[in-house]
């Protein structure tokens, strides 16, 4: 039976990316060796990193003066590297979910942290809109897509101070005005590659402004100077990331990814709104994520939740269980998710409605 992969992360990748990566595991570039058994400094591997960096710059239209890095540690390590490298006195954070909160917690060890707004009291079911970012903050940190709660900032924000964004789960799903940010980062395992590589886009001249000592491995400058090769980078995930970047380019780039994402999300939200058994959890429709679509069973059908899960699983749906802190369902529809799978889930919801 065909599986429809709605996993939140690690998550679906284009079939082509998996096949090309599998091929390189068996035989990299006809070398007779696996990509897993060659040096990251081998002359054949450098072009992989170079092309991945070039495609990042091309696809996101990254201006001059920015570096693209491939590191280890996940987005979670960036929560600490960000304040290490950028926080001198004060930083502002928008608290839109568990990841934002974790980022904020790390920053508190480095200086004053201002939570400009929070939707925690409403289980993060909306993104706060009315708040003031202190003009003397070193940076303003946002999470553009809240993977767990299904809220998303669909546009780049304007702020009186440099913006830093965790784009773990919506990178390459829309055009981004990178010039508005001094740093954009994320774990690759949502929309780009298998787990193990973290991407960081950093504005070079925003570095070197803090007075503290920064440990070598946690200093972005180390990795800029080393071309992401200061130590052994996650070779295989970088190779897979390159295949995804090529796939995005061949499929029309980020504008096309955004068009497809909106189309898929609109289809599913329309069914959630129409179907008497379900409702969306995000209260402000403008905040609804195109990537992670969260919904629950309406109160009068609440006891059928487990039944729907079983019904959907039998029809090939995978990974639709909501995060444990939210409950209900979450259908993650990343770039690689085909429209047919979204339609299969909609069919499932309609059949289940007819049964009751
Ligand atoms: C998954 C996720 C993270 C955590 O990423 P790790 O690579 O596991 O550290 C952080 N932020 C967001 C928005 C995420 O979706």
Image (spheres, grey):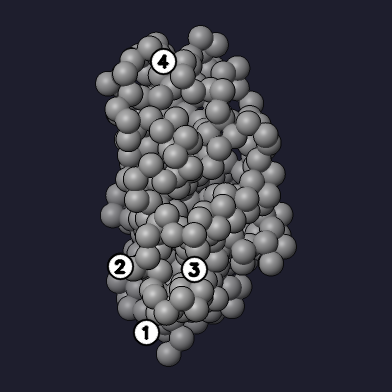
Q: Nearer the viewer, mark 3 or mark 4?
A: 4
CB contact under 8 Å: marks 3 and 2:
no
Dot 2 corresponds to which residue?
A: 303
- The residue located at (60%, 17%) in the rendering is 160
Above or below residue 4? Residue 266 is above
Residue at the farthest bottom position:
1
- The residue located at (48%, 51%) in the rendering is 169
Q: Is residue 274 visible?
A: no
Could you tell me residue 356's position as x and y percent? 43, 79
Q: Give the structural element (helix, strand or loop) at label 2.
A: helix
Q: Is residue 238 left or right of residue 250?
A: left
Tally the marks.
Answer: 4
**Residue nearer the viewer, 211 or 255:** 211
Residue 314 image label: 1
Q: Earlier in the sequence, mark 4 or mark 1?
A: 4
Dot 4 corresponds to which residue?
A: 210
Q: CA distance from mark 1 to mark 2?
A: 19 Å
Residue 13 image label: 3
Q: Give the structural element (helix, strand or loop) at label 3.
A: loop
Q: CA distance from mark 3 to mark 2?
A: 34 Å
CB contact under 8 Å: marks 4 and 1:
no
Q: Nearer the viewer, mark 2 or mark 4?
A: 4
């Amino acid at each position: 039976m065909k599986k429809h992969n709605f996993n939140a992360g690690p998550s679906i990748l284009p079939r082509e990316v998996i096949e090309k990566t599998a091929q390189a595991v068996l035989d990299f570039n006809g070398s007779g060796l696996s990509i897993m058994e060659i040096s990251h400094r081998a002359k054949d591997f450098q072009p992989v990193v170079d092309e991945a960096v070039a495609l990042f710059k091309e696809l996101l239209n990254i201006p001059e003066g920015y570096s693209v890095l491939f590191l280890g540690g996940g987005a979670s390590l960036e929560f600490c590297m960000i304040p290490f490298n950028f926080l001198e006195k004060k930083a502002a954070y928008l608290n839109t979910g568990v990841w934002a909160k974790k980022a904020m917690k790390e920053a508190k060890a480095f200086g004053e942290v201002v939570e400009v707004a929070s939707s925690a009291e409403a289980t993060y079911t909306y993104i706060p809109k009315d708040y003031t970012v202190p003009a003397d903050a070193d940076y303003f940190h946002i999470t553009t897509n809240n993977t767990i709660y299904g809220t998303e900032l669909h546009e780049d924000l304007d702020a009186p101070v440099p913006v830093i964004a965790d784009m773990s789960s919506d990178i390459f799903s829309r055009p981004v005005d990178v010039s508005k940010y001094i740093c954009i980062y994320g774990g690759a395992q949502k929309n780009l590659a298998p787990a193990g590589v973290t991407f960081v886009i950093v504005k070079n001249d925003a570095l070197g402004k803090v007075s503290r000592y920064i440990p070598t491995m946690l200093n972005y400058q180390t990795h800029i100077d080393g071309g992401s090769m200061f130590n052994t980078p996650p070779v295989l995930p970088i190779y897979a990331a390159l295949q995804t970047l090529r796939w995005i380019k061949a499929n029309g780039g980020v504008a096309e990814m955004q068009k497809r994402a909106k189309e898929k999300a609109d289809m599913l939200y329309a069914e959630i709104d129409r179907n008497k058994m379900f409702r969306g959890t995000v209260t402000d429709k403008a905040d609804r994520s195109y990537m992670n679509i969260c919904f629950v069973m309406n109160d009068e059908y609440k006891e059928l939740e487990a039944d729907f899960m079983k019904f959907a699983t039998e029809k090939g749906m995978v990974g639709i269980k909501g995060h444990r802190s939210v409950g209900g369902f979450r259908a993650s529809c990343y770039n690689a998710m085909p429209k047919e799978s979204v339609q299969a889930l909609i069919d499932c919801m309609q059949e289940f409605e007819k049964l009751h």
